Amino acid sequence: MKSYINSQTAPPIMQGSPPPPEWRLPFLDWDRPPWNRWAFQHVREFLPTAPVACPAHPSDMPQAYETIEDVPFEASYGKTTVADWIDRDYTDGFLVMRDGRIVHESYWNGMTPGTVHLAQSVSKSVTSTAAASLIQEGLLDPGAPVTDPLPELAKTAWAGASLQQVMDMTSGTKFDESDYANRASDIGKMDVAAGWKPIPDGYEEEHWPSCIHDQMLTLTERNAEHGERFVYRSMETDVLAHAMERVTGQRLPQIVSERLWKPMGAGTEACFTVDASGYALSCGGFNASLRDFARMGQAYLDDGRVGDRQVIPKAWVEDVRSGDHGLFNDISREALPNGRYRNQFWIEDADRMGHLSLGVFGQFIYVSPERGMVFVKLSTWPDFLDVERKRDFLAACHAIAQALGRDL
């Protein structure tokens, strides 16, 4: 079985006491199908994590529910409806907000409002959002060399790169993230360094870093000049996060809790996976509830404010929406033809303000300021990347917006 959609009978993964051997989570492949359909909601049960504390009282999330299940749209597989797409797309949770009110919220595959779900690379946007106040306070300078807070990087390929280039993924550092299935690639070694995977059989002769910082120090080769091109590389986020920790003297979970999660009124304690050094994996290890991801999206929609509090600096929000949207590449244009990448966010269209936080296996936060809408989807696709599924998500969002009177 490769995987199963929501309308199919779920196999008994990790069921029983103890679960039979054939249905126990394989540590090497826990993020692959069908295992990820269970694993992404149960990360705390098999990986070490650090908590991201939430406040005693969450911010309000008013409801004004609408019926959207029958909204039609054209998907990659033909004409469909939102309900059919939710089922086919391995959805765990889907939430839509309009003008600060929830108009749709649904849970699948055993997920509940209190479940925290692995966000994969949506974690990057969470991390940079927490960094925004550090920039506002002058603790981090986007235009300064990244070696200012991290002098040990002077002996790596990041020497001469600015923090902004790191945030925009335009440094020239070579990091192979072109094939997630390649166990010995840089991204494959990151899985081991992060504590996510064991060293795979047959690769023992390779150099395997013991933690993310150790891997960072091994990246000494440059394949472009800093600032001349965009290439998506997860390690850039970890450079940013190490800089955040260095200038604050705090660990990343504490920074995110104090500068984002508590101020925005999160309703559920979140968590990061941590490596052997105790470092929280900023590029992909964040876990949170569907509603709390929506709270973050709504804060962006509201110019960084939650109630009467400026949680995210307005200048940062404006820069994400309509600042210098930087660079892009051909492979990224397959899903976002006029897209860009800025501050650890994907820009849907350089001529508009909409932006996305994206994670492999189908994690999305989509903020559309022109429409006053936020869309959040948590999923467990059978594949790391799927351009057609990404396009289907945007097509569904656009159709829902049109049905609710918010077409562009």
Image (cartoon, rainbow, N blue to C red):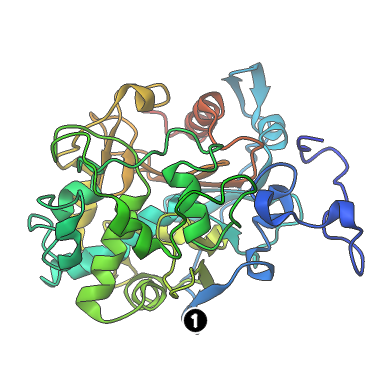
Q: Residue at x 35, y 43 (%)?
A: 233
Residue 394: give x, y in percent of width and height: 48, 31
Q: Quadrant of the N terminus?
A: top right
Q: Nearer the viewer, residue 211 or 122?
A: 211
Residue appearing at x 38%, y 38% in the figure = 176
Residue 315 visible, this angle: no
Residue 244 or 390: which is nearer the viewer? 244
Q: Secondary structure at mark 1?
A: loop
Please determine whether, in this image, residue 331 is positioned above or below residue 273. Answer: above
Residue designated by label 1:
57
**Of residues 281 and 81, the one drawn nearer to the viewer in this rendering:** 281
The vertical placement of 374 against 130, above or below, is above
Residue 129 shown left or right of residue 364 in the figure: left
The image shows residue 125 at horizontal and vertical percentages of 36, 54
Residue 103 screen position, x and y as percent: 56, 49
85 horizontally vs 126: left or right: right
